[in-house]
Amino acid sequence: MHLIEIEGLSKHFGPIEAVRGISFTVDRGEVVGFLGPNGAGKSTTMKMLAGFLTPSGGRASICGHDVVADGLAARRCLGYLPEGAPAYPDMTAASFLAFIAQIRGFRGAAAQEAVDRAVERVEIAAVLQQPIETLSKGFKRRVGLAQALLHDPEVLILDEPTDGLDPNQKHQVRKLIDSMAATKAIIISTHILEEVDAVCTRAMVIANGRVLVDGTPAALEARSPYHHAVYVRAEGKLPNAVVSELATLPQVKRVEAAGRADDQGVYVMPVGGADVAAAVRGLLAARGVGIAELRIERGRLDGVFRDITLAA
């Protein structure tokens, strides 16, 4: 059984088609990065999965429970962090989480244990007694994440989980997601492409309400013209004649300057992601050029994302 299953899901707001017949599944152990420009349909899809919006067509299920016909059972299996992490602003973080525990069916010592586990996981003990409205954006986000995790659900849907967090907090949340990944099915909506590489096993690109690409982060990187490009910087200035020779190597498409005034390196762009690193090293050695830095690029997700979404 797929923990998340979506088939032909659509949503219309009057004449506007926000989501157009999306279909996909997510299994236990998968962390799916949901990518797309603003207005692509990401949040609408997540809200339908979470039961906050009724689909105009198609179906969706969580842990085998239809989100419309059996919505209560579906939501028992789900932890949902909505965009903006809405909460009751006059409540303290502690009282809000206690309230969520009660809603989730916990009572007495079991409720406190569930709250304590969630608080420890997202590291918010220092702000428990503060009203939520007084918290920073980052801590509000972490309180929202705590409520999503409180009942240890099999499915997590997280809309921009690291929005507003500082670099250290982002690292903590990514570690937390990674630690849970093996036992859950997780969907993360994000604009932060480095997050896909950091925590996701799959990446889905959506635009105009349709899924355009669904594959591994590595497969997306392989679509980049910089996939397996060799960046090389000489110990001194790289002679123009050597740059010209690099461009004539077999399976080299072109050579690009790094493009910054303080960077004298070049990118040797391969044909079809070919491995040209050994040939680059060999040519520089033969010409007596010392290498200060040489690295192989994995590919640039930002460029791939632009190419896919702008072509939609």
Image (tube, rainbow, N blue to C red):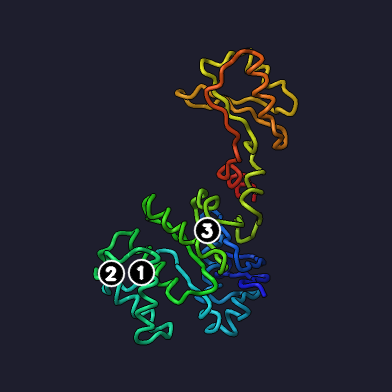
Tag 3 secondary structure: loop
In which quadrant of the rendered view does residue 126 lie? Answer: bottom left
Q: Amino acid at mark 2?
A: Leu
Marks 2 and 3: in contact by CB < 8 Å? no
Tag 2 secondary structure: loop
Work out whether 104 lies above or below 29.
Answer: below
Residue 303 in percent (x, y) is at 58, 42
Residue 143 in percent (x, y) is at 36, 67
Q: Amino acid at mark 1?
A: Val
**Sooner in the amino-acid sequence: mark 3 or mark 2:** 3
Crowding near the residue tagged with mark 3, few <14, some 14–19, many ≥20 C-alpha atoms within 10 Å: some
Residue tagged 3: 39
Marks 2 and 1: in contact by CB < 8 Å? yes
Residue tagged 2: 128
Residue tagged 1: 119
Residue under the point 41% across and 56% down: 172
Q: Nearer the viewer, mark 1 or mark 3?
A: 1
